[in-house]
Amino acid sequence: MKTKKLYYQDPYIQTFTAQIVEQNQDEKGHYVVLDKTAFYPTGGGQPHDTGFLHNVPVVDVEEVEEEVRHYIEETLDVKECTGEINWKRRFDHMQQHAGQHIVTAAFEELFGYKTVSFHLGKEMCAIDLDIPTLTEEEANQVEERANEVILENHPIETRWVKEEELRDLPLRKALAVTENIRLVIIPNFDYNGCGGTHPNSTGQVNAITILHWEKQKKHTRVYFICGNRVRQQLHEKHEVIQHLNSLFSAPQEQLEGAASRVFEQQKSLEKEIAELKNELLQVELEKTIEQSIEWNGHRLVKQIYQQRPMQELQQLAKSITQKSDNVVVFLISETEEKLQVVCTRSEDVPLNMKESMKSILPLINGKGGGSETMAQGGGEKLLSPEALLESMLLKG
């Protein structure tokens, strides 16, 4: 049975009463079909409405074979129910969808750029333009033109037409359907086939702001917001700016310069820290080499560290073998739950570090790899680092 679509008769309907025709279950859950509804189902780039049926939340709305399914989490035990639309969400979608028509038409009017897809997101909207790049000047001109159309407060009309009537209308793009054709029209500006909900005038879109754009394969994806979202974005950005004013002790017009100075200072400090770390590593390197002992005819360096990153272990081990001959290095780092191991040797030592690592990894249920001269691995702390080091020496 077809559901009578009240949202097409009047998109401003917020409450209605309808007869329950069917209650059933599909892969998405329990749903209710009514003889008529003001709930808009997902389609045409516009998300579904939410709200209540008989005070039960409607969490999704889909159209299947001309019946509108309202997904709710419990069965209704009435024959007639009252529906209530989440009007804030619906009107937001109406503003965004009409705004998309205006932005798309402005791109085409000014530059001939075609829109190939539209997405109405929770926080922002996006269209894909059939062009590889977009300039800032072009985006600014489109935004200005779009807001002119809003201020001119053109009517937004909807019309059901037959296919033969289309030849007399300047459609923005060819239609994919030949029956049940619904047009959304901004006279002398945009004529387009659309099944979504829209306000009855461009003035109710309120405002349009293009946020940014990016390359998307062969297209350019343009992100924008309309209506109440513009005001919300302004409030959020103003709060951020006020916080930055306090952090940088600078007014808005000087924030960029203040932030640049902080970043430059950070880069300088990071460079200085790296240099100091390298100096400390060299001191540690000399001290560690001095602590080497005799082992199987070679000099052995063995150390256990706490919370030492694997990258530092590898750097230290590599530096030792570069500065010393006939040396073998076993380093372990212990954390609360894991043990990490690095073993290496100088070129003149005939030992296979990869095999040494493979021999001890089962003791810690670990994984690792490497080469004959240097290997690394890690695993669970199933034994003490001292015991693991002893095993390495015995199997080495």
Image: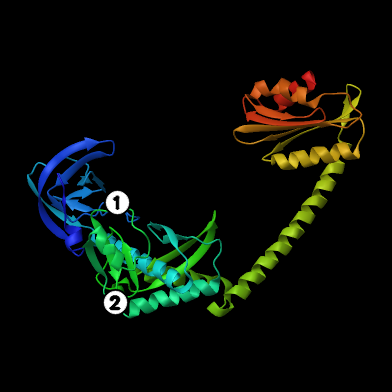
Q: Where is residue 326 in the image (x, y as percent from the top left)?
A: 91, 30
Q: Which residue lies furthest to the left in this view?
A: 79
Instruction: Say few, some or many: other residues with alpha carbon within 10 Å of mark 2 (under 14 / 14 to 19 / 20 or more).
Output: some
**SS for callout 1:** loop
Which residue: 22% across, 42% down?
73
Q: Distance between the residues labelled 1 and 2?
A: 27 Å
Within the image, what quadrant is residue 336 found in? Answer: top right
- Left or right: where does residue 176 sit relative to residue 72? right
Nearer the viewer's eye, disc 1 or disc 2?
Answer: 2
Question: Hey, what amino acid is under mark 2?
Answer: His
Residues at circles 1 and 2 in contact by the CB criterion of under 8 Å: no
Within the image, what quadrant is residue 261 found in? Answer: bottom right
Visible residue check, residue 361: yes
Question: Hey, what amino acid is under mark 1?
Answer: Thr
**Mark 1 — residue?**
42
Within the image, what quadrant is residue 25 found in? Answer: top left
**SS for callout 2:** loop
Asked if 231 appears above or below 176 in the picture, the reply is below
**Mark 2 — residue?**
154
Instruction: Say few, some or many: other residues with alpha carbon within 10 Å of mark 1 (under 14 / 14 to 19 / 20 or more).
Output: some
